[in-house]
Amino acid sequence: MPYQQHLRTLHGGHPEVFVSCRERAILELISDIGRGQSLEEVRNMFVGLRNIRPAVMAELLDHCHRVKVVRLVRDLAQQEDYDWATIAQVRADALSSGKRWSMVGPDGERLTLKP
């Protein structure tokens, strides 16, 4: 997937400054959990994601190779009962090696994601 896929300029903004579409932005945010972004903040933002485009999310998840990101998207989408949660489940199954993924954040909080 090209780097600038699902990036755009803001209306009236500088033509060389790009912002991510909402689907890519949430994946970028999830990627930063444990490195300055808290899981609680992401959960709070995830609640308002009723306008995610399933086809765009599927495309982005198909190109995402970070187990943490795909599993967290799956878990959060299932918790919120989003229609596109099955897309994330299929991608997590395809990416996962069957092992749990775990990390300890700078605040000492442990995050463990099941396969």
Image: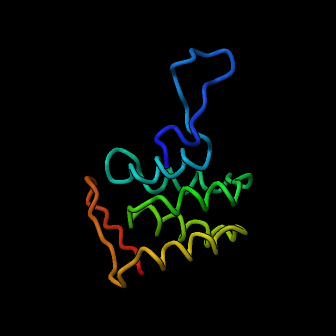
Residue at position x 62%, y 70% from top? 87
Left or right: where 47 falls relative to 101: right
The residue nearer to you, when weighing 55 against 68, is: 55
Percent from the top left, x then y, of residue 26? 54, 49
Rendered position, 13 above or below 55: above
Left or right: where 51 falls relative to 46: right
Rendered position, 12 above or below 29: above
Residue at position x 68%, y 59% from top? 55
Left or right: where 39 falls relative to 107: right
Residue at position x 57%, y 36% from top? 7
In which image quadrant can residue 5 be found? top right
In which image quadrant can residue 50 be found? bottom right
The C terminus: image quadrant: bottom left
| Colour convention of the picture | rainbow
Residue at position x 53%, y 71% from top? 75
Percent from the top left, x then y, of residue 2? 48, 44
Q: Residue furthest bottom?
A: 98
Rendered position, 93 above or below 82: below
The residue nearer to you, when weighing 55 against 26, is: 55
